[in-house]
Amino acid sequence: MTDTQIDPRTPVLVGAGQFKQRPEVPVEALEPVAMMAEALAAAAEDAGAPGLTSRATHTWVVKGAWPYPDPAALLNERFGASARTGLSTDGGNVPQSLVNMACNRIAAGEADVVLIAGAEGIWSRRRARRRDERIPYTSQTDKVPDEVLGADVVMNNKVEVERGLRDPINLYPVFESAFRASRGESMDEHRDRVAAMWEKFNQAAVANPYAWVRTPMTADEIRNPSQTNRLIGFPYTKCMNSNWDLDLAAALIVCSAEAASAAGVPTDRWLFPYAGTDGRDTNYVSNRGDLHSSPAIRVAGRRAMELAGVGVDDIDYVDLYSCFPSAVQISATELGLGLDRDLTLTGGLTFAGGPLNNYVGHSIATMAGKLRENPGSIGLCSANGGYLTKHSFGVYSTTPPEAGFRHQDCQDEIDRFPSVDLDADYTGDATVEAYTVMHGREAPEVALAAVRTPNGRQWARSSDAGLMDEMIRSEFIGTDVVVDDAFEFAPA
């Protein structure tokens, strides 16, 4: 099919660029907005239309760990564009969600050329500070973006924070234990399987020139604690955790078919977003129906495939959001993908890197290259923000979709799934539902457990050394415990 046979408002992803730096002298590193500019320039080159950035009608930036109030305006200045600017809210779901948003606006005639960029310079900034040096950042004052993209979601309640369940490193290993129990696996079987899966992720990163960590690792090296790979939240070692100590940038250019033709983008660079979906699980983990599944992934992920007119067996390439192994396994299970298939193109957030909110920018960019290398193939990208909280999906191919781009917000259906009440003040008899043991550099520090009570779910802790050792060595899910007035638990 030629571009003249395509609806001129059809959204097409025409350019994808990535940028990585690791300078010997940290203070010589490019600042994040300059990294974004490099990635956008690479995306325009990838599209075969270097001047495309100056034609932008919208420039959107994925929020990052930097101080610019309106980085999109700085990008417009660099490229001579007069585009409306946007800055996203937080969430690993953001890059795919922004692609969905761009496609909707393009299809509705509200946008023509949308630039989407994100970058993190955490590695160089930290190392410059260790030398008492600072990388010069462009200053912006009294500047706000034309629009804020997305809505902020509070994802921790007071009880979760007080009990130590406030960060991803605390909650994803809790999900992991629940997933293990749901499959009836022994602890050793489970750790072996997860390590073998993460070895495949490492192999993908070794083959990915934009991955941050490209050192080959075996499953045993990933699974077993060592001086360079200590336990973080059991059963996760450091090499099973997301890594944001890096300098990476990624950018995407989404156009209408009409704008792509006008800019001279060759049709062999066009990638068609078939469908996109968005949805979220309960804001607070405390209220999830269980801790081993995700209704939002089940509904939104499968709906994306339905809207695209494809089944799970039609998907040739997959990149699942992979901050921690539990996110991958729960997503694959909910989507109907086998855990033994290739589930990443980049290498995931441990090895390819987890640049705060922008990992999926790299995921989509890598997917674009893979699909162009194999015309007619179909790819699926998933994006996850929070604690398996906010989700976005995209289905892509080089072949134009018969029905055009289709999008759905799946929240109404997701909200019909049952939830659980937080029994915040409960003390007494309870049963362990899921848990982790958090480690310091030298030894275990605290066990964190979700326990089921007669009225819902409670969070409890223990710093008893003998108990923590037992919880690491043998399965503790299903154990009857007593929660005391300090919300400490002990076997009944």
Image: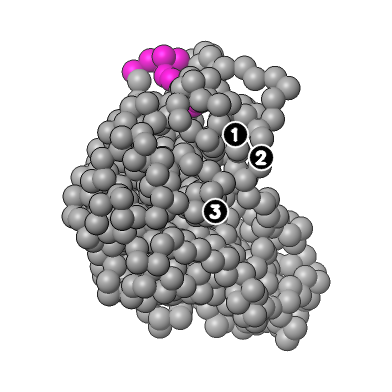
Front: mark 1 or 2: 1
Q: Is residue 256 above or below residue 327?
A: above
- Magenta-tinted stretch: 24-33
Q: Quadrant of the C terminus?
A: bottom right
**Residue at point 18%, 55% (across, down):** 374
**Residue at point 29%, 67% (across, down):** 315
Q: Choose top left, top right, bottom left or bottom right for residue 488.
A: bottom right
Front: mark 1 or 3: 3
Element marked by disc 2? strand
The numbered mark at residue 84 is 1
Task: Bin the neighbour count of mark 1 within 10 Å (Cα to Cα): few under 14, some 14-19, many 20 and up.
Answer: some
Q: Which of the two discs, 2 and 3, labels the residue nearer the N terminus?
A: 3
Task: Bin the neighbour count of mark 3 within 10 Å (Cα to Cα): few under 14, some 14-19, many 20 and up.
Answer: few
Q: CA distance from mark 1 to mark 2?
A: 8 Å
**Residue at point 27%, 75% (across, down):** 313
Element marked by disc 3? loop
Residue assigned mark 2 = 147
Residue assigned mark 3 = 108
**Residue at point 38%, 15% (across, down):** 25
Q: Quadrant of the N terminus?
A: bottom left
Residue 415 vs residue 322, the one in the foreground: 415
Pinpoint residue 403: horizontal percent, then vertical percent: 40, 67
Amino acid at the residue labelled 2: Glu
Amino acid at the residue labelled 1: Arg
Pinpoint residue 26: horizontal percent, then vertical percent: 42, 18
